[in-house]
Amino acid sequence: MIKDKLSLVAQKPGCYLMKNKDGNIIYVGKAKKLKNRLSSYFRGTHYGKTAKLVSEIVDFDYVVVNTEMEALILENNLIKQYNPKYNILLKDDKSYPYIELTNETVPRLTIVRSINRKKNLNHLYGPYPNVTAARNIVNLLNRMYPLRKCTIYNKKPCLYYHINQCLGYCINQVSNSKIETMRNEIIKFLKGDHSLITEKIKKEMLLESELMHYEKAKELKELLDYIEIVLTKQQVEMGDMIDRDVFGFYADKSYLAIQVFFIRGSKLIGKHSKIFPLLDDLYDTLTSYITKFYDKDVVKPKEILIPNNLNNELISAYLNIKVLSPVKGNKKKIIDMACDNAKILLNEKFELIKKDEEKTTLANEELKTILKLPKLDRIEIFDNSNLFGNFNVSGMVVYIDGKEAKNEYRKYKITVDKNDDYKTMKEVIYRRYFRVLKDNLVKPDLIIVDGGIGQINIARDVLESLNLDIMVAGLKKDDKHVTSKLLAFDPIVEIDIDKKSNLFHYLERMQDEVHNYTINYHKQLRSKGSLESVLSNISGIGEKRRIMLLKKYKSINKLKELTLQQLEDILPKGVANNLYLYLQEFDK
């Protein structure tokens, strides 16, 4: 079938969609010549993730377009629409913090991440390597410039006014020219020119020293050191103050490492690195990565520097910014430096990547083989807890392709008798998979219950009643409460697992993860329940006050942290005193 379809594909630009046996789209790619690209997947020998991808392909679709630009745009849209499992270019990439100088009459300095929600990007500076670096800059600027700190104008000055870090805009008239001067100097600093602030600190340090305020002078010296040591060393010779990003790469052993330098005002203020399996043509992969890079909370600079052999015109037209591939000079040197960093990154991380794959992807493949499953992309694991005989709960954790998918975890507060494990399992399995059917959610390839034959049979009965065909397995523990066997098939058989194998440790990690997740949820409920019972024992705390305290503090420990004075700020004096004394005796 695939061979026949390949013979019909044209040598034109377009996108292709690889499908597995269930008809699900598992990879989307683009090509300048579709026929050549598609044929490359079905000839020769493939390795690593590419081999795994090819092994799952049973069919493909394709869309012919007129130009490479149309193919690039279509590829981006198709990936967003289908979220294929093998399109991993930007998955799990973190967003970077930026410093925002707010566009208000009296500006404030804030740290933001979700920049795609911002309508005005003119006053965003960064990205910074981490939130600590951004916070240090904000603290330095707030120390040097008495900007507004509060989000709303209060009727009386706050602490910042009394320590000379705010001019008290809520009570004082401050001239626009003074505010504008501060704004301009801050912008100059954030764009990379530190000279003004350096001179300010030196003058203030000298003055404090002459007044024999040595502690103050020492504090200013530390600020000066921070600027000169931490910020000045970021200087790169670019010959101008243009904001630019620099992309470098290195490919080896079927993996691609990418290094991005963020250069702002001739300062290297941060960098981004990524390693992922190379599943497609190298230069198409790089083009896709660069064009998609700015979809995820990254401000586009004025200019991008990229290595040779890429389609600069295509990238420039897609991003609507200047793209250069210099062959000499300082710009070429910074690209070479980015490529060298990418090479070092891949060489250093490759062994770690291999070990991680052995512990996750390969262990998952071994489990698939043992259980004779056609595919094992998604596993859902359940555990129940009725610790201390109350607050009966269940937890579900999810593993996708051998790794935790924490945003897919779910908690269940069980309604049945807390001492009946079978009824608990019946309720949680029914609630989960009725919801899967009702909302058309992704079904797992395997369900694992933390229990024996009885729990497996309960889960199977529920699934059968819902007309769902999903394999259920169990994990059996020995007399030392250590996982010893895998229970599966029908009739159920016990499968021995080598305790030194990656598969054993994989199952053990899953079991620990679901157990800890469920126990933590149980403790949260228990703490909240205990707080409710405590509050109901205090004279003067009615329903409204009880609800207010539960919403605000959520646990006994948080409430116990309050002083008597703090309690009196939110409760009548007598009630506050009763609650304070009760909390001091609680758990003694």
Image (spheres, grey):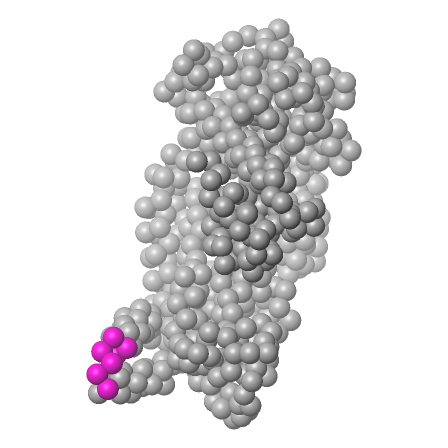
Question: x and y percent of residue 53 in the render?
Answer: 55, 35
Give the camera-side residue of 382 and 300: 382
The answer to whether 319 is drawn above or below residue 224 in the figure is above
The answer to whether 390 is drawn above or below residue 353 in the figure is above
Question: x and y percent of residue 32 in the render?
Answer: 60, 53
Instruction: Using residue 169 as the reference point, say whether residue 240 is left or right of it.
Output: left
The answer to whether 492 is drawn above or below residue 198 in the figure is above
Instruction: Using residue 573 as the reference point, say whether residue 209 is left or right of it.
Output: left
Magenta segment includes 511: no
Check the image and name the residue furthest to the front.
574
- The quarter of the picture where residue 334 lies is bottom left
Asked whether residue 189 is in view, the answer is: no
Give the camera-side residue of 453 and 294: 453
- The quarter of the picture where residue 270 lies is bottom left
Asked whether residue 485 is in view, the answer is: yes
- The quarter of the picture where residue 241 lies is bottom left
Instruction: Using residue 148 as the reference point, say whether residue 196 is left or right of it.
Output: left
**Residue drawn 51% across and 82% down?**
168
Give the camera-side residue of 6 and 295: 295
**Residue drawn 54% across and 62% down?**
113
Question: x and y percent of residue 571 in the render?
Answer: 60, 56
Give the camera-side residue of 476 and 498: 476
The answer to whether 234 is drawn above or below residue 396 in the figure is below
Quarter of the picture containing the C terminus is top left
Q: Which residues are magenta?
A: 211-217
Q: Count up the numbered dots.
A: 0
